[in-house]
């Protein structure tokens, strides 16, 4: 494993958060952004992450070659090497509930630092936005955060996997500058694409 990847994997969440604005404003709505490890997630947060994923993806996984396998997916999501960017809608001071420690998660990305074909990459495993706030620019904000983290930690690419069935997601990633990794005829035989975006890091 590259020293870059080892260094990135040892980074604290405070260090990873240094390039992610704590408060993001989008269409006059403020959101709180934070980077956390699985061990820093509360039970409520883990449930919210899973609920958003299931709501968005269950029907696609059910029809895919991977199938719908919650235990396996949860193991992948909450693996110790995973890192999360969480977005919560910020409560206004006059409406804040003193009994509510944190507002609920409305979107997140899960990523890991890894090696792919001898390149240092930030691999985006999930980018999920709650259906109630989709098509409002939140996905774009999360992807920009991922790219900023990748550049900060000298990753050469951001990579991800997208189901061919999920046409809206493919078009979103395409618009964000991602390209399909074409490595042989196997691409046509799979029900997903691997996409990547260069980070211009030597």
Image (cartoon, rainbow, N blue to C red):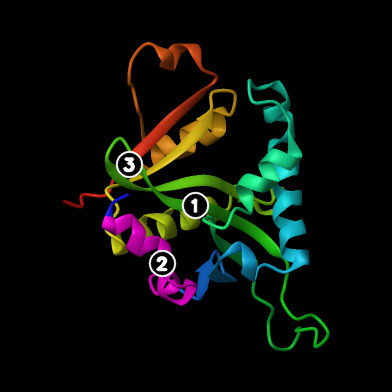
Element type at mark 2: helix
Image position of 110 (left or right of 50)? left
Residue under numbered circle 3: 197
Who's the residue at 70% across and 26% down the image?
A: 67
Residue 102 lies, in percent from the top left, at: 72, 76
Who's the residue at 27% across and 39% down the image?
A: 118
Q: Nearer the viewer, mark 3 or mark 1?
A: 1
Who's the residue at 27% across and 58% down the image?
A: 3
Residue 106 lies, in percent from the top left, at: 67, 59
| 16 up-or-down from 83: above or below | below
Residue 122 lies, in percent from the top left, at: 39, 50
**Extreme-left residue of the structure:** 202
Element type at mark 3: strand
* Mark 3 vs 1, N-terminal side: 1
Checking the image for residue 111, the label placed there is 1
Could you classify mark 3 by the number of other residues whose Cα lies within 10 Å: few (under 14), some (14-19), or many (20 or more)?
many
**Extreme-front residue of the structure:** 1
Residue under numbered circle 2: 10
């Amino acid at each position: 494993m590259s020293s870059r990847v080892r260094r990135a994997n040892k980074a604290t969440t405070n260090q990873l958060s240094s390039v992610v604005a704590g408060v993001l404003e989008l269409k006059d709505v403020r959101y709180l952004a934070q980077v956390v490890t699985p061990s820093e997630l509360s039970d409520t947060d883990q449930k919210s992450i899973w609920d958003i994923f299931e709501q968005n993806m269950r029907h696609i996984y059910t029809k895919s070659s991977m199938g719908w396998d919650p235990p396996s997916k949860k193991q992948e999501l909450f693996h110790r090497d995973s890192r999360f960017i969480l977005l919560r809608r910020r409560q206004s001071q006059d409406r804040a509930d003193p009994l509510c420690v944190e507002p609920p998660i409305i979107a997140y990305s899960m990523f890991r630092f890894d090696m792919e074909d001898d390149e240092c990459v930030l691999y985006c495993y999930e980018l999920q936005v709650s259906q109630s706030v989709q098509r409002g620019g939140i996905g774009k904000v999360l992807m920009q955060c991922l790219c900023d983290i990748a550049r900060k930690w000298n990753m050469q690419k951001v990579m991800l996997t997208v189901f061919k069935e999920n046409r809206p997601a493919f078009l979103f990633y395409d618009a964000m500058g991602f390209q399909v990794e074409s490595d042989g005829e196997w691409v046509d035989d799979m029900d997903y694409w691997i996409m990547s975006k260069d980070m211009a890091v030597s």
